[in-house]
């Protein structure tokens, strides 16, 4: 269905619907809510900012879930890269769900190979205008992406990061978002 080999959906709707999220930046009045609120009325893509205009045209929400709420880093990320729909998953439940039920971590040795994917991905990011990389906090947990169908219809697409800096192919995200929006 999609062009990428990372597409196997291992998370079910029940795995992700009740994950507790908090809006970022954190404030005293920021109440936690069930993740399913993000896609209650329309489909939702969890991560992938580059396709925002196309996703907006489809009526799809674009949300980013972080594993840490480091104030200075969150403010910089929100200001420079992700101005809206930014949430904290304090329990790292989304990260477990995208990892097939477990929290997947990479190794520091990946940073030792100057010809490895870490440096390839850093070079690709630099070409798109990303000049700084956050090295604060826990940086070894792998993430990924979900395209969630509206309501309780479930997961349309899932991408699992396998190497630091892996991203879901934009064309796969858009195809999944179009399919979710059509339902």
Image: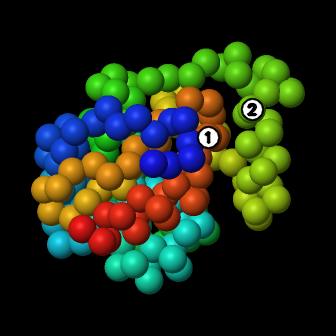
Q: Residue placed at 35% from the left, 37% from the top?
A: 9
Q: Position of residue 144 (x, y in %)?
A: 46, 42
Query: Left or right of 179: which side holds 129?
Result: right
Q: Residue placed at 34% from the left, 27% from the top?
A: 100
Given residues 59 and 16, the one toward you in this image is 59
Q: Position of residue 21 (x, y in %)?
A: 25, 52
Asked whether the residues under the numbered discs 2 and 1 touch, taking CB atoms below 8 Å apart as contact, a structural biologist would say yes
Number of numbered tags placed on the structure image: 2
Query: Left or right of 124: which side holds 39?
Result: left
Give the mark nearer the N terminus: 2 vs 1. 2
Cα distance in 3D space between marks 2 and 1: 8 Å
Q: Position of residue 142 (x, y in %)?
A: 50, 32
Q: Position of residue 97 (x, y in %)?
A: 31, 34
Residue denoted by label 1:
166
**Neighbours of disc 1 within 10 Å: few (<14), some (14-19), many (20+):** some
Given residues 153 and 21, the one toward you in this image is 153
Say which mark, if any, is on residue 32. none
Q: Residue furthest right?
A: 115
Q: Residue placed at 21% from the left, 51% from the top?
A: 154
Residue denoted by label 2:
117
For residue 83, above or below residue 27: below
Q: Quadrant of residue 26?
A: bottom left
Q: Residue placed at 49% from the left, 58% from the top?
A: 173
């Amino acid at each position: 269905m999609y062009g990428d080999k990372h597409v196997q959906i291992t998370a079910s709707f029940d795995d992700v619907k009740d994950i507790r999220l908090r809006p970022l930046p954190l404030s005293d009045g920021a109440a936690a809510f069930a993740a399913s609120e993000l896609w209650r009325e329309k489909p939702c893509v969890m991560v992938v900012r580059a396709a925002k205009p196309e996703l907006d045209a489809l009526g799809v929400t674009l949300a980013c879930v972080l594993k840490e709420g480091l104030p200075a880093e969150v403010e910089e990320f929100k200001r420079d890269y992700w101005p809206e729909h930014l949430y904290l998953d304090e329990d790292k439940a989304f990260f477990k769900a995208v990892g097939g039920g477990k929290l997947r971590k990479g190794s520091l040795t990946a940073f030792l190979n100057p010809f490895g994917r870490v440096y390839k991905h850093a070079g690709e990011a630099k070409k798109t205008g990303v000049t700084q990389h956050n090295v604060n906090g826990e940086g070894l947990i792998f993430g990924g992406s979900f395209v969630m169908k509206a309501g309780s219809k479930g997961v349309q697409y899932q991408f699992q990061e396998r190497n630091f800096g892996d991203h879901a192919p934009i064309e796969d995200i858009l195809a999944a978002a179009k399919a979710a929006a059509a339902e």
